[in-house]
Image: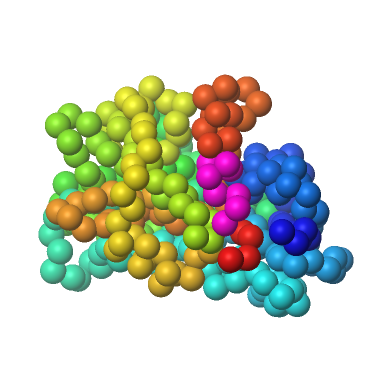
Amino acid sequence: MKYLTINILHHHLHTEFRAKMSIMAQFAKYWEKEGHIVNFLFGCEEYIPADILVIHVDLSETPEEYLTFARQYPRVVNLGLTDIRKRAISRNLVERGDAYRGPVIIKTDLNCGGTPEVKLGTRPEAKPLSWLQRMKKRYKLKDPGVIQTPSDYLIYSQKRKVPRSVFKNDELIVEKFLPEKHGEAYYQRRYYFLGEKEYNEIHSTSVPIHAVDSDDHLIDYWEEQEIPVQLQAYRKELKADFGKIDYVIRDGQVVVFDVNRTPSAGNVKGDPVAAKWAQTIAERLHSGIYPT
């Protein structure tokens, strides 16, 4: 095998500490063990020649300057996946005037409530909470005006119950709420991929929204060998070379919840379970970057 030089491109304000918490950093360890050179780039100021560039900018939209920089390289991972906002990737959006009347969920258009955009300075910090919002937070009452993480998402049994202000807010989206339930457990599926390498798992939880594996809602998780053809076709439509797709199976159909181009490896230093899981993902997927 020819030894490769692989560059991983981060946002210029991204820290080395945060970069090391990603699944991509786990891949890099394997590439280096196998004799390849890996460079971590922070911003577009310095061009370092490489065989492959991985765009790993933790924003919902990849800025054009990073795409322009990336096009200098002979092969680029995720050059085609430039926008993962919910309005771009969702197939279950609901509008106020459409015919859908069933249960809905309110999310932010940006991934992770726009937190990465705030951290990297592309979006201003949220305004201080009002007195009413502070009271709601104190008593653990959800507010569509304060959604920062998936645990803040709101579910309504009928679309007509959604406040009108939500439909007028460009930072929020309304989707059909289509969970996958087996008995008392909810199933949430995660599909990881790099090139032709794939890994698919199911998380069984006691709640319909589960985004933090360390919480008390996780019942069990396991690898699922069968990967839906419909999901693979959706990935191809997105032009996604690397990432994670959260989804469920509802009435035999794939329902996508979220797309992530920069998935985290979790607390690999402090949590042995997370470390073993990240190692499994890296072992299975890292070779997907090699030319076939």
286 in the magenta segment: yes
Tell me the chief SS of the magenta region: helix
Q: Nearer the viewer, residue 36 or 239?
A: 36
Residue at 66% x, 26% y is 269
Question: The C terminus is located in which quarter?
Answer: bottom right
Residue at 21% x, 58% y is 253
Q: How is the image coloured?
A: rainbow
Indicate the quadrant where residue 92 lies. Answer: bottom left
Q: Nearer the viewer, residue 266 or 273?
A: 273
Residue at 30% x, 62% y is 229
Where is residue 189 drawn, in percent x and y? 34, 44
Residue at 48% x, 44% y is 148
Q: Nearer the viewer, residue 5 or 126?
A: 5
Q: In the image, is 292 to the left or to the right of 207?
A: right
Does the rendering let one see residue 193? yes
Q: In the image, is 192 to the left or to the right of 34?
A: left
Indicate the quadrant where residue 201 lies. Answer: top left
Does the rendering let one see residue 162? no
Where is residue 23 drawn, in percent x and y? 60, 44
Question: The N terminus is located in which quarter?
Answer: bottom right
Where is residue 162 drawn, in percent x and y? 24, 54
271 in the magenta segment: no
Above or below, 243 against 141 in this view is below
Q: In the image, is 254 to the left or to the right of 252?
A: right
Total marks shown come to 0
Where is residue 171 drawn, in percent x and y? 44, 60
Q: Which residues are magenta?
A: 281-288
